[in-house]
Amino acid sequence: MWRSKYDMDADAFAGDVDRLWGEVKPLYDALQCHVRAKLNESYGDEVVPLDQAIPAHLLGNMWAQSWGNVYDKVAPEGTAPAYDLTALLAEKNYSELDMVKTAEGFFTSVGFDPLPETFYERSLFLKPEDRDVVCHASAWNLNDIDDIRIKMCIKVDAEDFQTIHHEIGHNIYQRAYSVQDPLFRNDPNDGFHEAIGDMIALSITPDYLQQIGLLEDLPPAEADLGILLRQALDKVAFLPFGLMVDKWRWQVFSGELTPDSYNDGWWKLREQYQGVRAPNDRPADAFDPGAKFHIPGNTPYMRYFLSHIFQFQFQKAACDLAGWEGPLHRCSIYGNEAVGEKFNEMLEMGASKPWQDALAAFTGKSEADATAILAYFAPLKEWLDEQNADRECGW
């Protein structure tokens, strides 16, 4: 039933997901190999053997689903960060509201209407002092027409600067498909909404930061390596985890995994796809999958894998439309109304057409394509291959 929501045969969808994973696996394998080698330098052969999967507890994240917190251990040597966005925001005395206005300015620059006044009156931007609230960032569509809001406890830093662009992207999408009948006021598959917000965040490039006055001098191309590696530790490292969570559940639902093999099946998939293993021997009656909210919460997870594919496919299509000729990771669509107009055509479709039609309306292709990720991270892949030249990769 979960797989039947993708406008194609359920088994065909499972096969298509495997195809997408096959396209990005060489990039992931190169990243895993480099990270394992650098962790080995920090912790030694006994803790991180070079012929085994990486112990999950060393990757800086509860579920080892994103690895950004170990960047300092795996960063390119002699490459100082190109810039510190958090410091730039402080230097320019940005307030929380300034960050929201800047993100709105991105969307108006590509031709979208300004946000309604009610957005600013009704959104939650600051953590209240008189009550507890859920600070996890979210975007809200209250009346299916124009009452759109975000809810987050904004901190003036680089992470929230990106998050605001992402969340307002959701709001822009919600307002765009409000022209549809009520049943179609949603995305055509559950990977689109997250991908829209993330694709916008990909346009937060040095060039964009310079255009809005946050950055004075553009960093040289060699400085991109650190930026790309940091992105890959979050976005590329996530791909196999985003895939195996539902791979595990599909096996549970089909009966291939039974309660006495739930935990062993979980770690078998994690090792197979992520090259990550349990920190110690896990008892068969443990239930480690339950530590991930979406499992007990019964929330499908394939949307997150798909969103990581679609966001780069959208970005490449947008940059092709803009006539961009440089490295894909340096492309920003800020200020390009022609791209914004074409983008809006897809957003306005909502769920009124199969997702393949919506995808084709903007990208010209009716099937998901992971090769845009390879194009985006091409300079990093070349560097990783150089680093891994004398290493034994795989697990």
Image: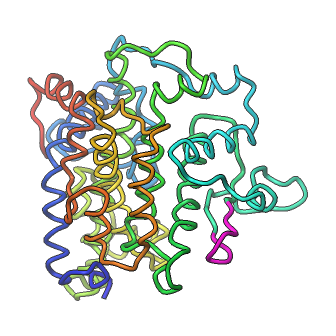
Question: Quadrant location of the N terminus?
Answer: bottom left
Quadrant of residue 234 in the image?
top left
Left or right of 149, for residue 240: left
Q: Quadrant of residue 252?
A: bottom left
Q: Is residue 128 left or right of residue 352?
A: right
Looking at the picture, how far across and down is residue 23, in whole percent?
14, 52
Above or below, 57 relative to 375: below
Residue drawn at 53 percent across, 55 percent down? 169
The residue lying at 74 percent from left, 40 percent from top is 96
Asked if residue 286 can be seen in this view, the reply is: no
Question: What range is drawn magenta here?
Answer: 141-149
> Foreground residue, 361 or 86?
361
Q: Is residue 295 above or below residue 23?
A: below
* Of residues 48 and 190, the one drawn nearer to the viewer in this rendering: 190
Q: Can you say whether 298 is above or below 99 in the image?
A: below
**Residue at point 20%, 28% (across, down):** 384
Counting from the top left corner in percent of width and height, residue 118 is at: 77, 62
Q: How many marks?
A: 0
Q: How is the image coloured?
A: rainbow
On the question of residue 314 being in view, the answer is yes
Quarter of the view holding residue 262: bottom left
Residue most toward the right?
A: 130
Left/right of residue 22 with respect to residue 94 in the rendered view:
left
In front: 74, or 192?
192
Compared to residue 147, the image places residue 32 above or below, namely above
Q: What type of secondary structure mainly makes up the magenta span?
A: loop
Image location (x, y in percent) of residue 2: 32, 83
Question: In front here: 164 or 349?
Answer: 349
User: Residue, x 63% and y 22% (percent of image)?
Assistant: 88
Query: In the rendered structure, does residue 73 fall within the stretch colored magenta?
Result: no
